[in-house]
């Protein structure tokens, strides 16, 4: 026992201040909470800014909300009086997004199946990080690609037929580029969803003599469906909100059409053109951007929220 | 009475050969999908490089934008990107990591607190899905015009406020106007959810046994976070932050809202200076009708991609190193 | 007085799998060793819940000062839960709550106003799996003292050496104190964790199956260490291994389905269990 006491070095007088410790703990907690609160403030501000200025638009523009949401003509600058029917913008936005999804979803899902079911660990170790790298390509670059490569290819492939004529700007060109933009992300998310499926299910199916194709189609995809759906919804939200590609390659005429070879204007495209030119500061067309911005916000919010709900459900199923 | 056991002996079999063919075809289709994915994106990079190589030289990096394509350079845009991203990193990373720490390590016990945390979590999920252009609108309204109450409206009730002097780098003014500070802060809003998500994941991956060891030694919560959790999560946080920064570097839409389409021949000198960034400079070149400027744009893209590759490469290196260390 | 007693009639040297517990019981009973003990930890009327599930029912027991007490019982019987309430590590689990009273040295430790830092300084804990920090061996041991005390460099050196010596690790690591603790073997890591716990000079050490992740040789080493610490610390040790309980503990408490079934001197519990359930468990009839 005496030996023990001899080794005693920690003496109470040398204790660090308990008050200081508790105080700094409190300060830290308050600071962290403040940081967390900032994200809430950010959301609140987004909603406030869009809502208040959007309402201002309805106050000064000669348009009822009913006409705004059902009108098929959008001409805030050229027509007198200006026409504010939002449907052409919504149509353009959806057209581009649907084309993008037609590219991204099948390609992304199939590539994901190859990655998770067929690829050797070595191949995956190379492909997966590269995919992440490609997911980081800036959107301006893809816009440039749409204008310089995709459009000429489309024109070369179709214009000689005489039936379809691709202009320098088209929904198709922009949509394809947006699709390639989303592709790596969709592929990556789908692969994650497939890998989340417990190996026991996979083994069980293969053990019954099913081929990998049968396993993928009958077991894995149904089991990973919610993950795949949520990946799709997130990608869709991204396609709807994508700005630079459509600003470069989709055109600047708001046309109410479902024809992919026509030029279209999207919600984001309109916002860029309005804010960019600094056209008559604080005029009615300036506020129209807030109104369509609010619409865009609601659209993406719905999709992210739906995606979140779906994903939350499949997490519960397998964790 | 005994019923005969059902037998599959005489049931018609599916063709084995057919199944094998389907399997082969499916595998091929999957591989083709992957090859197309990579093929298209690599074609993109190759074509850009092909177009961009013509004007790529040292003068391009140090030069100013010009009406003559052969003289055009990216110096102001490069410096603008540097300024904006520095501001963005200095605000987004601390706030983002702090929020992640709050979310992961300060889980409250009472039900109201837990509800608030769930709201916060959901809020961040949704912020991550907000299109970047909406952040641009937010930045424009809040930072640039301060709800249009201020000088830019140049009404009779206009006001403004300034600290510091325009001759030094530290010069603040409210409303911020179309300044690099407003741009950097807006970019910070864009990447904040990305950083929070990445940092949360990194913090969650710290084994709870380490936290418990620290707590059991009488460390307070913050001491545990600072001395055990954050050091262990640092590689993950760094990787996530770098990837988020590379997103900020490539982001054009929100900056477009803030800075407008400006033709600048100088780099920002203080926080309130006008600015442009690389993606925006590229956008303005792409929009020009002359063929030569498209090649200049391609050269700009090559520079931009080189910067991004540098960032991503660093992130991958950090991750690999952390994995090796265990 | 000698506390390191090899004369308790129990096989101290046997490794974990050497003999069947039945052997222990078949030996003639010993005279209970008269040890003057006062209770260090008093648990009374203690209930504990996870959400709406009750994990421990109305437990009352005293844990003697400077003795080694083993908590035995089948998996899920609440031993680890009880242990983790004594330094309030269960506060980390949002759904966990407790009723009743636990006092250490006469001070109540349940309830809101308790300073957890002070409590955990007094009550150290060693975990199931060795959990050294990803720092150097030196920094692992110095972690606690540096947190709580203002110390000079040489003082920290002294504490590190002293603690490692007591944990029987000093000679093995003195030349590589600056190397990562993760480079040590599992057994060494666990002894490092014990040294780390001792470095803040607790009065109570809780051990939650400290050997379950270790090989028999390392287990024997840890058991020796526990034996050396007897008399200077109140040690409460959860174990699945009844040989271990028999070898190292002075007292044994048997828990079953959240209730304390029997608690007494180790020899008595193993040789003359008062309860049928205890005997069945010790004889390996269930669990």
Image: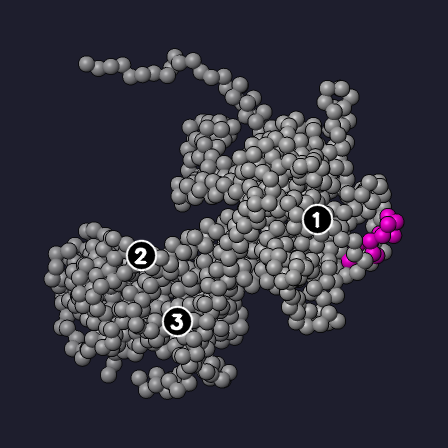
Q: Using a 10 Å C-alpha cutoff, classify the residue at mark 3 as few (fewer than 14 neighbours), some (14 to 19) or many (20 or more).
A: many
* Residue at mark 2 shares a chain with residue at mark 1: no
- Residue B82 counted in the magenta span: no
Tell me what residue is drawn at x 62 percent, y 40 percent: A267
Mark 1 and mark 2 in contact (Cβ < 8 Å)? no
In this picture, is C65 found above or below C180?
below
Q: Which mark is residue A280?
A: 1
* Residue at mark 3 shares a chain with residue at mark 1: no
In this picture, is A257 found above or below A309?
above
Determine the chain carrying the residue at label 3: B
Tell me what residue is drawn at x 46 percent, y 50 percent: B122
- Residue B74 counted in the magenta span: yes
Q: On the image, numbered disc 2 is attached to which residue?
A: C95
Estimate the x, y position of residue B297 in percent, counting from the top left.
79, 46
Which region shows up in magenta? B63-76
Mark 1 and mark 3 in contact (Cβ < 8 Å)? no
In this picture, is B23 found above or below C173?
above
Q: Which mark is residue B217?
A: 3
Between circles 3 and 1, the one closer to the viewer is 1
Determine the chain carrying the residue at label 1: A
Determine the chain carrying the residue at label 2: C
Between circles 3 and 2, the one closer to the viewer is 2
Q: Is residue C225 left or right of residue B182?
A: left
How far apart marks 3 and 1 lie (CA) works out to 65 Å
């Amino acid at each position: 026992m005496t030996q023990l006491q001899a080794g005693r070095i920690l003496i109470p007088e040398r204790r660090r201040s308990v008050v200081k410790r508790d105080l700094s703990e409190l300060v830290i907690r308050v600071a962290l909470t403040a940081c967390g609160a900032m994200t809430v403030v950010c959301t609140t501000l987004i909603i406030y800014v869009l809502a208040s200025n959007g309402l201002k638009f309805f106050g000064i523009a000669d348009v009822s909300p009913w006409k705004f949401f059902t009108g098929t003509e959008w001409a805030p600058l050229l027509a007198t009086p200006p026409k504010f029917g939002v449907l052409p913008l919504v149509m353009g936005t959806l057209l581009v997004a649907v084309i993008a999804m037609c590219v991204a979803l099948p390609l992304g899902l199939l590539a994901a199946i190859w990655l998770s079911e067929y690829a050797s660990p070595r191949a995956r170790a190379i492909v997966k990080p590269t995919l992440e790298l490609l997911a980081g390509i800036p959107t301006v670059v893809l816009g440039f690609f749409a204008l310089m490569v995709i459009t000429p290819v489309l024109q070369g492939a179709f214009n000689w037929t005489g039936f379809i004529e691709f202009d320098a700007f088209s929904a198709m060109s922009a949509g394809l580029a947006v699709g390639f933009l989303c592709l790596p992300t969709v592929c990556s998310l789908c692969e994650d969803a497939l890998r989340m499926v417990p190996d026991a299910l996979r083994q069980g199916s293969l053990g019954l003599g099913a081929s990998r194709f049968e396993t993928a189609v009958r077991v894995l995809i149904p089991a990973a469906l919610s993950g795949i759906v949520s990946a799709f919804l997130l990608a869709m939200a991204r396609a709807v909100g994508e700005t630079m590609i459509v600003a470069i390659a989709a055109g600047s005429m708001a046309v109410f059409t479902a024809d992919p070879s026509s030029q279209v204007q999207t919600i984001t495209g309109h916002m860029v053109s309005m804010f960019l030119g600094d056209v008559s500061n604080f005029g009615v067309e300036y506020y129209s951007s807030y109104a369509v911005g609010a619409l865009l916000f609601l659209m993406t919010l719905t999709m992210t929220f739906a995606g979140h709900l779906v994903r939350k459900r499949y997490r519960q199923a397998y964790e | 009475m005994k019923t005969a056991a059902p037998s599959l002996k005489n049931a018609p079999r599916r063709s084995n050969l057919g199944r094998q063919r389907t399997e082969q075809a499916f595998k091929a289709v999957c591989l083709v999908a992957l090859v197309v994915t990579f093929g298209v994106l690599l074609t993109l990079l190759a074509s850009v490089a092909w177009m961009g190589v013509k004007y790529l030289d040292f003068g391009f990096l140090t030069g100013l934008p010009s009406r003559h394509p052969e003289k055009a350079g990216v110096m102001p845009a490069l410096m603008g990107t540097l300024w904006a991203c520095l501001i963005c990193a200095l605000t987004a990373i601390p706030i983002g990591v702090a929020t992640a720490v709050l979310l992961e390590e300060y889980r409250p016990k009472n039900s109201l607190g837990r509800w608030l945390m769930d709201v916060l979590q959901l809020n961040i999920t949704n912020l991550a899905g907000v299109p970047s252009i909406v952040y641009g609108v937010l930045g424009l309204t809040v930072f640039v015009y301060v709800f249009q109450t201020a000088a830019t409206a140049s009404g009779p009730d206009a006001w403004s406020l300034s600290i510091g002097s325009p001759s030094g780098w530290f010069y603040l003014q409210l409303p911020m106007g179309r300044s690099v500070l407003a741009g950097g802060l807006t970019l910070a809003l864009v990447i904040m959810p990305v950083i929070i998500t990445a940092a949360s994941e990194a913090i969650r991956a710290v084994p709870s046994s380490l936290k418990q060891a620290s707590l059991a030694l009488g460390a307070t919560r913050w001491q545990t976070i600072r001395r055990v959790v954050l050091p262990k999560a640092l590689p993950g946080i760094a990787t996530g932050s770098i990837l988020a920064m590379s997103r900020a570097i490539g982001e054009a839409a929100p900056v477009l809202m803030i800075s407008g389409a400006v033709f600048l021949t100088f780099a920002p000198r203080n926080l309130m200076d006008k600015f442009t960034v690389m993606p925006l400079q590229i956008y303005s070149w792409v929009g020009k009708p002359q063929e030569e400027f498209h090649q200049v744009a391609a050269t700009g893209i090559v520079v931009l991609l080189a910067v991004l590759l540098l960032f991503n490469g660093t992130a991958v290196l950090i991750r690999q190193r952390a994995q090796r260390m265990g | 007085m000698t506390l390191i007693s090899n004369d308790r009639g129990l096989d101290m040297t046997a490794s974990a799998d050497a003999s069947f517990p039945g052997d222990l019981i078949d030996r003639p009973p010993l005279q209970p060793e008269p040890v003057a003990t006062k209770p260090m930890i008093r648990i009374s009327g203690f209930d504990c819940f996870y959400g709406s599930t009750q994990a421990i029912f109305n437990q009352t027991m005293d844990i003697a000062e400077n003795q080694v007490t083993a908590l035995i019982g089948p998996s899920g019987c609440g031993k680890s839960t009880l242990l983790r309430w004594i330094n309030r590590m269960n506060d980390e689990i949002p759904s966990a709550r407790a009723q009743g009273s636990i006092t250490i040295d006469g001070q109540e430790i349940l309830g809101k106003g308790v300073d957890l830092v002070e409590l955990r300084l007094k009550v150290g804990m060693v975990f199931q799996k060795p959990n050294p920090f990803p720092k150097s061996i030196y920094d692992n041991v110095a972690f606690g003292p540096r947190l709580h005390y203002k110390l000079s460099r040489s003082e920290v050196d002294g504490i590190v050496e002293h603690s490692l010596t007591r944990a029987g690790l000093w000679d093995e690591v003195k030349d590589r104190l600056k190397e990562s603790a993760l480079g040590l073997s599992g057994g060494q890591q666990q002894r490092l964790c014990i040294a780390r716990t001792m470095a803040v000079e607790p009065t109570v050490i809780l051990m939650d199956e400290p050997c379950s992740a270790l090989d028999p040789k390392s287990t024997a080493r840890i058991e020796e260490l526990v034996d050396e610490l007897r008399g200077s610390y109140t040690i409460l040790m959860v174990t699945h291994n009844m040989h271990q309980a028999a070898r190292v503990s002075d007292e044994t408490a048997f828990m079953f389905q959240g209730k304390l079934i029997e608690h007494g001197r180790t020899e008595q519990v193993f040789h003359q269990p008062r309860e049928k359930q205890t005997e069945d468990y010790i004889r390996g009839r269930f669990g």
